[in-house]
Amino acid sequence: MSVDSIELNFLSIFTFISFFIFLTVEKFFKNTTGVLLDKDFIKPQAFHKNAVPRVGGLAAIFALTIFFIIYSFLFNQSSMDYLFLSIAFFCLGFLDDIKVKINPSSRLIIMIIVLLLSTNLFSINIENTHLNFLNVLLKEKIFQVIFTVLCFLFIVNGSNLIDGFNGLLGIHLITINLILLFINVIYGESQLAIIITGQLLVLASFVLFNFPRSKIFFGDSGSYLFGSLIALNVIKTNNLNPEVSSFFFCILLFYLFFEVFFSFFRKLYQKKSPLKPDQNHLHMLSFRFLDKTGKFKDCNYINSLLINLTFIVLIIPSIYFKNDGIFCRYWFFFLLALYIFFYLRLYSFVKKQFDI
């Protein structure tokens, strides 16, 4: 049997395994009344009207653990870095899902410790940025570790930040992973392509139960889990494919990254704690705008579609010019400016309508 046949058979079987796990978890927790049921409708990031179990992360970690273990045995390739990050970040998020309160500062410290262990145990690092001054700094081990940890923190917290509407995070992660898969396939990085495909299958299974009507939520466990995986996918794809501009990967992650970066300084300017949630993030403002128009019966999933479709349209030019460092660099900063422009317009509208 050829290697291609083994890969295809493995992924085909895993498709059914992943869907079955999500189906089983959804059915088991369907009528739950326990701590995993999200019935807090007054928290700032709550935009759902019915109680929904936060078990997407639980189903995902079961499926991914099976995938990584079988992958390692089948292809004789270690996936311990993926497995370690998956379990560590799942556990951290799951504590919040089961109502074990950890203050934001302590959670951040735990994340940093996990990432420091990961970067050292598995030699996870960013090898090239296509910025000469930064590449010089990255030759220093301590700076390399700090820079890598910061990149993970931005993406993990960005994933958790935008998770709140049906399909918003799931579809967004599918979009990014599909582009990473495309890059690794055309440049012959088949092993990483298989790992990304496995994650895509799990994400697709989740979206089937989360969009357009939500039967399960990711929970913090799911958003932390996939935030860490998407960051690792991008770092590995960047290292393995030096032909592609590093700024192209910045473009892929600009929404996750800039949502955290912009929100941090916005809250400081508004004299709020940057570590506490509020209702003034871009995806929340766009929801209120859609809801105010009165044109849609259910703005929850419409909002997710609008944001993700806008994201796809905005990154299409960079896919064509992915090897052009100059274009990608300027396109990245253009997207940041565009984000700020639309945010300020939406914020001004919502502020007048809702007196926030």
Image (cartoon, rainbow, N blue to C red):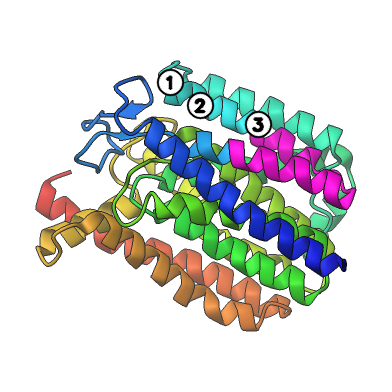
Q: Mark 2 belongs to which amino acid?
A: Phe
Q: Residues within 10 Å of mark 3 (few under 14, many from 20)?
A: some
Position of residue 288 measured from the top left corner of the image (x, y, whole percent): 20, 54
Q: Quadrant of the C terminus?
A: top left
What residue sits right under mark 2 in the picture? 94
Q: Mark 3 belongs to which amino acid?
A: Ile
Region rendered in magenta: 62-87
Front in this rendered view, residue 96 or 139: 96
Q: Mark 1 belongs to which amino acid?
A: Ile
What residue sits right under mark 3 in the picture? 87
- Compared to residue 274, the image places residue 77 above or below, namely below
Displayed quadrant of residue 331: bottom right
- Compared to residue 338, the image places residue 107 above or below, namely above
Position of residue 124 measured from the top left corner of the image (x, y, whole percent): 81, 44
Q: Quadrant of the N terminus?
A: bottom right
Instruction: Check if mark 1's residue and mark 2's residue have beta carbons within 8 Å.
Output: yes
What residue sits right under mark 1 in the picture? 98
Residue at 55% in and 24% down:
107
Q: Residues within 10 Å of mark 1 (few under 14, many from 20)?
A: some
Residue at 21% in and 38% down:
50
> Tag 2, which secondary structure?
helix
Q: CA distance from mark 1 to mark 2?
A: 6 Å
Residue 146 within the magenta-colored segment of the rendering = no
Does residue 296 appear in this view? yes
Q: CA distance from mark 2 to mark 3?
A: 10 Å
> Tag 1, which secondary structure?
loop
Instruction: Check if mark 2's residue and mark 3's residue have beta carbons within 8 Å.
Output: no
> Tag 3, which secondary structure?
helix
Q: Earlier in the sequence, mark 2 or mark 3?
A: 3
- Compared to residue 295, the image places residue 103 above or below, namely above
